[in-house]
Image (tube, helix red, strand yellow):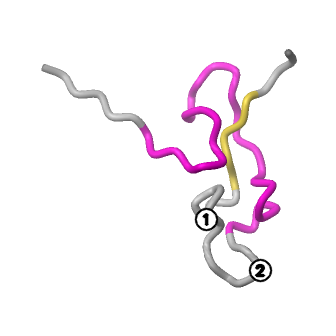
Amino acid sequence: MSIQSTPDLNPGDVAAPGTPGAGEDICDACAGRGTLADGKPCPQCGGSGRVMEGIGGG
């Protein structure tokens, strides 16, 4: 039996890395800094400053 693991997604991610039609973008909540004004890690991007978003039209 094979167990597939899913990548950990942050609340700001709309797709997992490598998903067709998705790409990495700067987190709007922290403007790509990875931290909020109080110095704590951004909860939307998990402190990375980047989120996965859908790309393309529609």
Relative to 57, 49 lies left or right? left
Q: Main secondary structure of the magenta part?
A: loop
| Label 1 vs 2, first from the N-terminus | 2
Q: Give the quarter of the figure containing the C terminus.
A: top right
Quadrant of the rendered structure where residue 42 is? bottom right
User: Where in the figure is residue 14, as x and y percent of width and height?
Assistant: 64, 35
Q: Is residue 54 above or below residue 25?
A: above
- The residue that label 1 is drawn on is 47
For the magenta stretch, what is the residue range? 7-34
Q: Residue furthest bottom?
A: 38
User: Where in the figure is residue 2, as x and y percent of width and height?
Assistant: 19, 22
Which residue occupies 81% across, 55% down? 28
Q: Amino acid at mark 1?
A: Gly
Q: Secondary structure at mark 2?
A: loop
Quadrant of the rendered structure where residue 54 is? top right
Q: Which mark is residue 37?
A: 2
User: Where in the figure is residue 31, as x and y percent of width and height?
Assistant: 82, 62
Magenta-span inclusion, residue 28? yes
Q: Residues within 10 Å of mark 1 (few under 14, many from 20)?
A: some
Query: Label 1 vs label 2: CA separation?
Result: 13 Å
Which residue occupies 63% across, 78% down? 40
Q: Secondary structure at mark 1?
A: loop
